[in-house]
Image (cartoon, rainbow, N blue to C red):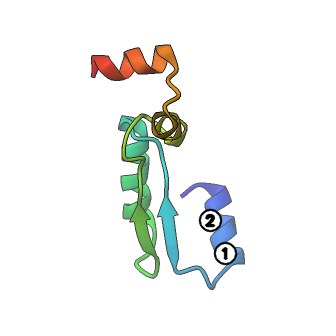
Amino acid sequence: MPIALEKYLGSNPSVRKIRIHFDNDIAGRKAAQTLKTILPDKYEIVDEPPKAGKDFNDFLCMRMGIYNKKTHERNEER
């Protein structure tokens, strides 16, 4: 478990729900699955990746109609 998360959870014993907002790529999906696997059952884990785009910045830009040409081209290749 990441040290910062372990320290935060140790200092905040009232936390029962953890929302994960990692990137919507292979590394982000694997990291979310790993955390869901290693965290104790006492936590409710909610995995909420962006609905579109690689990350929430891409998602926000799409929602606002702001397209970064490089990002837009990369998404079209998928």
Quarter the N terminus occupies = bottom right
Most distant residue in the front direction: 65
Give the CA separation, mark 2 to mark 1. Answer: 6 Å
Circle 2/circle 1 CB separation < 8 Å: yes
Whether 1 is drawn above or below 9: the answer is above
| Nearer to me, 30 or 54 | 54
- Residue 39 position in % (x across, y down): 45, 68
**At label 1, which amino acid type do we have?**
Gly
**At label 2, which amino acid type do we have?**
Glu
- Residue 75 position in % (x across, y down): 35, 23
> Residue at 51% of width from left, 69% of height from top?
18
Determine which quarter of the picture holds residue 29: top left
Most distant residue in the bottom direction: 14
- Residue 9 position in % (x across, y down): 63, 72
Secondary structure at numbered mark 2: helix
Whether 29 is drawn above or below 64: the answer is below
Whether 44 is drawn above or below 14: the answer is above
Secondary structure at numbered mark 1: helix
Q: Residues within 10 Å of mark 1 (few under 14, many from 20)?
A: few
> Residue at 62% of width from left, 61% of height from top?
5
Most distant residue in the right direction: 11
37 vs 19, left or right, is: left
- Please give the residue where the numbered disc 1 appears in the rendered image: 10
> Residue at 38% of width from left, 36% of height from top?
25
- Please give the residue where the numbered disc 2 appears in the rendered image: 6
Q: Residues within 10 Å of mark 2 (few under 14, many from 20)?
A: few
| Nearer to me, 2 or 29 | 29
